[in-house]
Image (cartoon, rainbow, N blue to C red):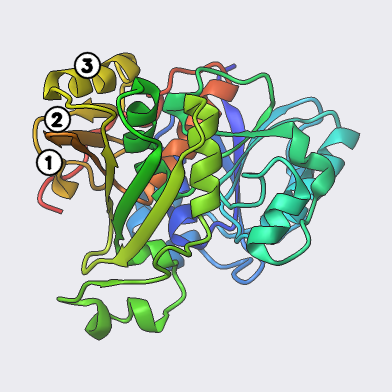
């Protein structure tokens, strides 16, 4: 294949914009539609001026108008950055129409709609009926570093908090060195709240401020527990306190646990390095990870500390890239037999 058509649903949000940026320089994927009902017909560059050099003549497309431009029998890389609760129905409609024309669609969904394997589990967390329960069995959900491959054609990418926490938590659980009761702090930047202004993301409220929200009741905690168990084989207690930080991009997560006995730091480092030995986007560091080292990239830094029988593993990621668009691109690369690094190996700016 010289190129594969790529489409982004929900293309006007922050994650949608990051997906467009990654597609613009990808060696295989070629954007054919940036889909947005609210801004259909408007230039992409009006919403994302920084993408003007790549998409100066590209207009947002309305739902239902773009599939006919893709030749019958063609492959299609479909990314969905549509909101929770809306993404599933949109994907289902595309798959139904594509089947009629023998278009080989592979989907990576960044919303929460396919992170659970049954509708009841999804509905218990999100409080609404699932938009396409018939498709739940066609998706797998995992952090790319925790699942070598999948025989499904569709993937649900975990949330940004989940990605950061799982990168730290799974090595602890797999090592067998800690009790499976995890105490987690996560701090996220304001872009994690989405493009629409909210009181919590309003600059005068966020600047020079730090506060917890939904302590021990965040809706992604069950997702984290499920994915940690799938990756490690151990069901862990997840005690999660998220925080809003005074920065735009990034997540810093700390996962603390009690060791089953006194533990040497070298053993914990061996566990981390063993799990991520072949992971091009995970860097095990001495001491604390730092957001400045990963923002605007698909890299994750994982660090650790040990004192007696107390252990902490820490992760820093960019919430919009590794936690969303970049992780989604990793999965789409795999679905089309590309290396994980395709389109993701660019050098990010420093001092962001």
In x, y percent, where is residue 274? Answer: 29, 14
Q: Secondary structure at mark 2?
A: loop
- Tell me the number on the disc at residue 285: 2
Which one is earlier in the sequence, the residue at label 1 or at label 3?
3
Instruction: Classify 10 Å Cα crowding around label 2: few (below 14), some (14-19), many (20 and above).
Output: some
Residue plotted at (45% across, 45% down): 237
Q: Label 3: which residue?
A: 270
Residue that carries the numbered disc 1 in the rendered image = 288
User: Crowdedness of circle 1 by 10 Å Cα count: few (<14), some, many (20+)?
Assistant: some
Disc 1 versus disc 3: nearer the observer: 3
Q: Are marks 2 and 1 in contact (CB under 8 Å)?
A: yes
Q: Residue at x 39, y 67 (%)?
A: 215
Tag 1–tag 3 contact (CB < 8 Å): no
Question: Is residue 310 among the parts visible in the rendering?
Answer: yes
Residue 149 percent coordinates (x, y): 56, 18
Which residue is nearer to you in this view: 256 or 65? 256
Q: Nearer the viewer, residue 323 or 259?
A: 259
Secondary structure beneath dot 1 equals loop
Q: Is residue 129 above or below residue 288?
A: below
Query: How far apart, in angstroms, are the residues tagged by discs 3 and 2?
Result: 12 Å
Q: Earlier in the sequence, mark 3 or mark 2?
A: 3
């Amino acid at each position: 294949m010289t190129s594969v058509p790529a489409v982004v649903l929900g293309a006007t949000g922050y994650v949608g914009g990051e997906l467009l940026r990654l597609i613009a320089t990808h060696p295989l994927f070629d954007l054919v539609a940036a889909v947005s009902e609210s801004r259909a017909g408007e230039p992409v560059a009006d919403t994302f001026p920084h993408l003007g050099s790549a998409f100066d003549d590209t207009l947002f497309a309305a739902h239902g108008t773009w599939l006919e431009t893709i030749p019958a029998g063609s492959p299609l890389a479909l990314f969905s950055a549509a909101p929770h609760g809306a993404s599933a129905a949109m994907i289902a409609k595309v798959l139904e129409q594509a089947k009629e024309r023998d278009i080989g669609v592979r989907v990576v969904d960044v919303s929460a709609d396919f992170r659970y394997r049954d509708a009841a589990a999804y509905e218990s967390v999100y409080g609404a009926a699932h938009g396409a329960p018939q498709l739940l069995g066609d998706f797998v959900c995992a952090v790319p570093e925790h699942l070598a491959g999948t025989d499904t054609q569709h993937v649900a990418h975990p949330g940004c908090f989940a990605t950061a926490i799982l990168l730290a938590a799974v090595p602890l659980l797999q090592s067998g060195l800690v009790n499976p009761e995890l105490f987690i702090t996560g701090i996220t930047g304001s872009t994690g709240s989405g493009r629409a202004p909210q009181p919590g993301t309003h600059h005068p409220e966020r600047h020079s401020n730090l506060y917890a929200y939904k302590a021990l009741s965040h809706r992604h905690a069950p997702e984290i527990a499920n994915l940690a168990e799938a990756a490690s084989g151990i069901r862990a207690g997840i005690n999660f306190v998220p925080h809003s930080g005074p920065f735009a991009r990034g997540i810093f997560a700390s996962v603390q646990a009690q060791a089953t006995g006194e533990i040497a730091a070298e053993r914990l480092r061996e566990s981390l390095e063993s799990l991520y030995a072949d992971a091009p986007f995970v860097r095990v560091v001495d001491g604390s990870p730092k957001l400045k080292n990963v923002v605007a990239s698909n890299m994750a830094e994982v660090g650790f500390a040990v004192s007696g029988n107390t252990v902490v593993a820490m992760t820093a990621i960019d919430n919009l890239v590794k936690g969303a668009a970049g992780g989604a691109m990793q999965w789409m690369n795999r679905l089309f037999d590309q290396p994980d690094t395709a389109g993701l190996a660019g050098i990010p700016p420093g001092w962001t």
